Image: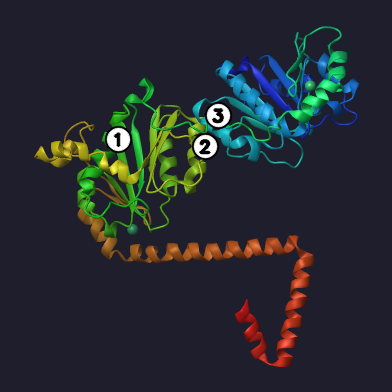
Amino acid sequence: MDATAKHATAKIAVWWDMKDCPIPENYVSGLIRSSIEGKFEERGYFGPVTITAYGDQTQISDYKLQGLWTAGISVVHTRSESRHYHMYRDIVEWRGQNPPPATMMIISDEVQGVFDWDLLRLQQRTLYNLFLAYSEGCQAGVILHTSAEWSWRELLYGSKSRRFGFHYPKLYCYSCNFDCNFNCRTLTKFKKHLSSFKHIRQEDVNPTYEQVACVTKDWGRNYKATPEYATAKIQVWWDMTTCPIPEGYDPRRVRPSIEAAFKELGYSGPVSITAFADHNHTPLQALSSTGIDVVHVVPRFTYISTDVFNWHHNNPPQAAAIMMVISDQVDWIKHCLVGLLQANNYILFLAYSFRPSKKSFLLTSGEWLWEDLLAVSEKRAQFLQKCSLLQKCSSESESGGEPTATFYCKLCSFDTKSIDNYRTHLSTDEEHAKEEKRIPAYYNSKIKDNRRSRVAHYNRNHLREVKEYRKSERKRMKKAIRTGFGLLHNQLRRR
Ligand SMILES: [Zn+2]
Ligand SMILES: [Zn+2]
């Protein structure tokens, strides 16, 4: 992606892990800055670039260190195991001081697995332009929304920038918090420090920080609405298979409960709800009477992500809007959601029937247990009962009049506004009946095919073990033939 006008002259910060992407043997380290700047300039980015290199600097030659220093690259010494911790801490600090528009670049092989969880959450809240670079053959975290990804090699050997600028690089030792000021003897002082008794003792005594500090861990629990979102429209996708209507609960209370929960947080925009289920077995009349759109699906195959993309497609990009997913299987669409959350001005709410065991990288503005959410309208139940027309009250955020709902069959792409036509379609349409059987059968065969190809892939990578296994199987079979199948039968039973 080429630079937009606001990014063309914005700041660029580069964090470079020298262990994963070292300076090649015969490469002149003084060229690294102009190589990185050159690559950015190709894309239309001309903002000031700061580069910080992290690694065990006792391993770098004086000549290479001199090159980095002259090119205005800051050099940070950390123990190898702590480099991710320090890099990430610096990234977070920089983000705090430099609001967007600004550009970040991370040069590391371990964005995926080390930085991605927290970085993804940060990017959903505040989006920076992000560039990645990594050594040959290493893939970065693909779900991060990046402007470009380069290999370390193409970065080093690409076109060079001709720009000239003053930089004040730092030399820093994170093991001792030792900082070298900018003067002509700085390099000697830094090298001397790294071989000093004091430094070596500090490295031995100080704790090692191996994990990056996830600053976003506690983010996102019932955040109150900001003015931008207070009246934004709210789209709810409700998977009724995993979050059904509880026994004895009035289905007409689902909408008022959801609306009331949002209102408690200050969100009062219009709410659209789409309920995905096998609608042969749901209270269709009651749901649609409160303006809930219904989509018929085969249980386990809800396809919510297609609807999410369609909704995104029908909304102006970047507009403030609210997404909510009610499902225990949000994992199935998390990649689609996180993509949209990074690139648009959307926020996300979740509801589920039980709390997920592992915290997701999806950054939410609120999460509810499904039963707690349904109980929200209880406080307002008395008021609702007084209303002569429950459905009118329950959709008070709509622009007045009878709420309207649409009826859709995902299997046949059949849609109607008439509940009777819909019921007839679900219960008597022959083509529909065929689709209901075909889809699960098709997916089951897909699962078997996938398993077969995974087994074949495993075998290809473990040829020696496969040969040995087959040999032992043949031996066992021969023995079984010799001794009668009773023995084999017993062996199989023991397995
Ligand atoms: Zn030190
Ligand atoms: Zn159908």
Tell me the crowding category of disc 2: few under 14, some 14 to 19, or many 20 or more residues within 10 angstroms, Cα based.
Answer: some
Judged left or right of residue 324, residue 202 is right
Question: What is the CA distance from the residue labelled 1 to the residue labelled 2?
Answer: 26 Å
* Pick the front one: 33 or 482: 482
Q: Is disc 3 placed on a helix, strand or loop?
A: loop
Kindly identify the residue that appears in the image at 77 percent across and 76 percent down.
Answer: 471
Disc on the earlier residue, 3 or 2:
3
Residue type at tag 3: Val
Residue type at tag 1: Ala
**Mark carried by residue 261:** 1
Residue type at tag 2: Gly
Question: What is the CA distance from the residue labelled 3 to the residue labelled 1?
Answer: 27 Å
**Mark carried by residue 215:** 3
Disc on the earlier residue, 3 or 1:
3
Disc on the earlier residue, 1 or 2:
1
* Pick the front one: 36 or 175: 175
3 or 2: mark nearer the eye: 3
Up the image or down, 285 lies above or below 473; here it is: above
Tell me the crowding category of disc 3: few under 14, some 14 to 19, or many 20 or more residues within 10 angstroms, Cα based.
Answer: few
Kindly identify the residue that appears in the image at 70 percent across and 17 percent down.
Answer: 50
Up the image or down, 162 lies above or below 149; here it is: above
Would you say the beta carbon of the disc 2 residue lies within 8 angstroms of ligand 2?
no
Instruction: Determine which residue is flagged by label 2.
Output: 339
1 or 2: mark nearer the eye: 1
**Quadrant of image for the N terminus:** top right
Would you say the beta carbon of the disc 3 residue lies within 8 angstroms of ligand 1?
no
Residue 114 pos. (x, y %)? 65, 37
